[in-house]
Structure formats: structure tokens, C-alpha cells
Image (cartoon, helix red, strand yellow):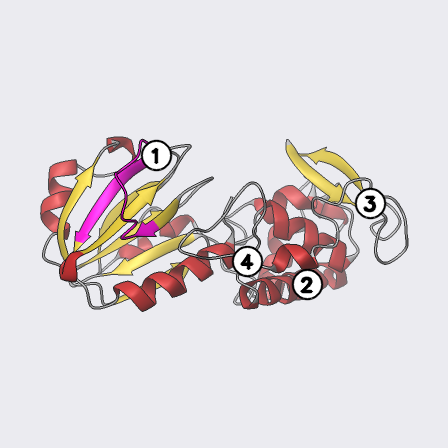
Amino acid sequence: MPELPEVETVRKILSNQLTGLIFEGVDVYYEKIIHEDLNIFRSTIIGQKIHRIDRIGKYLIFILDQNALIIHLRMEGKFYINPNEPINKHEHVVFHLSHEVELRYHDTRKFGTMHLRSLDHYLNTYPLNQCGQEPFDIDKDFFFEKIKKKNVAIKSILLNQKIISGLGNIYVDETLFDAKIHPNRKGISITKYESDQLIESAKKILSEAVNLGGSTIRSYTASLGVTGLFQLKLMVHTKVNEPCQICGTTIKKIRVGGRGTYVCDTCQK
């Protein structure tokens, strides 16, 4: 699944190639991805210019003349620009842009979503009004208040996009390892010091991942010619049965909240 670093990498590439272009047409082959009336979606978007592309958490936001096109890639969503080959069964939305540019949305699982919102209030309506702040912006005291009474695993809390936005399975595992906190620890057991450390670790991990273009692993490849390199820096995620690089303890794979989770039982008590 693309997480904040992968989505940020896609955003940068799309921004470089699409800013200033105008939507001239759209073909939709799987209507459930468009969470609007399809005819209104099509008629509204055509003729509008892409002024910039933003990101909030895991959402891409195309800022147009009057609207914001909000896209969530979910599990497998990705974009291709001018692929020069026939449309395949996994390409569900094709945008035709000025200068004969074709932008294809490819999604094997069909879980991605697209919303069109007015520029006047797109930040305050669904789905963006459901997003917590990112680790880079979140107030540490606010975060501690959110987690200190929760009797659920800290990993599940960090995956909750309403509490803190942008972290997914890969970077939660790496954040918890860096903060030396076991993923099964309950929110109510996390001290203020540990809570602050989680935010610092998340910022550190995400910053390095963004600089390296995200992670290219079996579960997600960003396309657009993107090959992330952060997978070379992973300390625990996917490292089951390998020795911990810090203490030598064998990395385990467990399940937390239904998610495969990698942990060092010595570094993460």
C-alpha cells in the first residue's frame, strides 16, 4: 500500500509533468472509483486547469480552477502518463489532458477513490475532514491526549488516519522500532516521553523515506518510473528470521490488529 513517502513521490512527479495542463476529457471504465455522479464529475472537470498538486496524508489533491480533485490510491492505485500501449483491464479511469497528454489510473484491486469538491470548502468536507495531522505538523500534547486513554495496541493507534495521518504498515513498524516500543503496547501504557519519541521517530523515518523516494517492495511499486530505495534502510519490516541489526535477536513476525507486524523483542520490550 502506498504510504506518505510513496504518495509524496508520486505527487512530485505528477506536479512536474501535469501542472498547467487542462482536462479535455475523461473515460471511466469502473464507475465505483468515482464517488460522485459520473455525468456531473465529467462535465465539471472538463475545461479546468491543474494549478498544482498537493498532498494531505495519503491523499493526492489536484487543485483546479474551481474544484479540488481528491484521490486516494488505496492498496494498489498508481498512475501512468502516456504509456503508449492499449488500455488494459486494470486501467479504470483515463484523463485526456491538453498537449495530447494521457493520464491513466491503474488499480488492480479497484479500491481507489476519487472525489470532486469545491475549492471553497474541500478541506472541511469528506474525506479530508477525516484526516488527522501528519507527524510533521501534529502537536505532541494533542497526540498524547488522543492515545493515553486508549486500551488498544499502539500500532493500531498509529495506523488510525483520524488520529495521525500518513503512516501505514511499513513506516509504523519502523517508527516503533526506532522508538523502542513494542507494537502490542496499549495506548494507556505509553508515557508522555514515549509519546513524544514516537512523533520524533515518525518524522525521522518519513523524512528519510521521502528523500529516498519511498519503498519499492512487493506490495507496492509507484510506477511513473519511480523506484524507491528506502527498502534498503528497513530495520524490521520484512526482516522476519533475520538478526536485528542493533542487538542480533531474530526478528519475529506477529499479527497486531490483523496486520502483519515485524518486531525485535529485545529492542522493543
Which is more foreground, mark 4 or mark 2? 4
SS assignment at label 2: helix
Q: How much space separates mark 4 and mark 3, taking CA atoms?
A: 22 Å
For marks 1 and 3 on the same chain, the one whose residue lies earlier in the sequence: 1
Sooner in the amino-acid sequence: mark 2 or mark 3: 2
The part of the chain drawn in magenta is: 80-96
> How busy is the neighbourhood of tag 4: few (under 14 within 10 Å), some, or many (20 plus)?
many
Tell me which numbered mark, 1 or 2, is placed earlier along the sequence: 1
Q: Secondary structure at mark 4?
A: loop
In primary-sequence order, the first of circles 1 and 4 is 1
* Residue name at image x 49 percent, y 59 percent: 133
Residue that carries the numbered disc 2 in the rendered image: 201
- Mark sitting on residue 24: none
Which class describes the residues within 10 Å of circle 2: few (<14), some (14-19), or many (20+)? many
The CA span between labels 4 and 2 is: 20 Å
Q: CA distance from mark 1 to mark 3?
A: 36 Å
Which residue bears the numbered disc 3? 242
Q: CA distance from mark 2 to mark 3?
A: 22 Å
* Disc 4 residue type (three-letter): Gly
